[in-house]
Image (cartoon, rainbow, N blue to C red):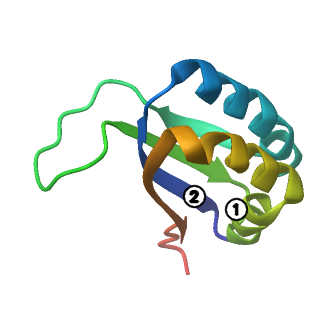
Amino acid sequence: MRKGYWVAHVNVQDQEIFAKYKEAAARPFARYGARFLVRAGQSDVREGELHPHTVVIEFPTFADALACYDDPDHLAAKAIRDPIADGDVVIVEGYDDAG
């Protein structure tokens, strides 16, 4: 099975409240085997315009990535984040050149 990924570009206006989102989101992330590959580190946008923070989260499967996003605990955490952050999130299936 191919892995699943969340790719997000986010602009956060309140880091204190965002920390509460990260704390609340930790439970569903752990439940679905999330692993952060990129978490708002230094970046250099070479084409287009993006929000300043990029996050890439890997899940064991595409189905896990979808289920985590729709999990009631994640949606509750998202409700904490939504008033203080805007951005784009896409859930994508990983590439497997073996098949």
Mark 1, residues whose alpha carbon is within 10 Å: few (<14), some, or many (≥20)? many
Question: Which amino acid type is marked by label 1?
Answer: Ala
Q: Secondary structure at mark 1?
A: helix
Report if the CB atoms under discs 1 and 2 are less than 8 Å apart: yes
Q: Quadrant of residue 80?
A: top right
Q: Which residue is mark 1?
A: 65
Q: Quadrant of the C terminus?
A: bottom right
Above or below for 12 versus 76: above
Q: Earlier in the sequence, mark 1 or mark 2?
A: 2
Judge whether residue 93 can be spotted in this image. Answer: no
Q: In the image, residue 4 lies at what x, y percent?
A: 62, 63
Give how far across and how far down residue 13 sits, in percent.
Answer: 44, 30
Q: Is residue 58 left or right of residue 51?
A: right
Q: Which mark is residue 5?
A: 2
Please name the residue shown 69% across and 54% down the image.
59
The answer to which of 18 and 90 lies nearer the viewer is 18
Residue 34 x %, y %: 72, 45
Q: Residue at x 57, y 58 (%)?
A: 5
Q: Secondary structure at mark 2?
A: strand
The answer to whether residue 66 is visible is yes
Residue 45: x and y in percent read 17, 42
Q: Quadrant of the N terminus?
A: bottom right
Badge 2: residue crowd in 10 Å (few <14, some 14–19, many ≥20): many
The residue positioned farthest toward the top in the image shown: 16
**61 or 47: nearer the viewer:** 47
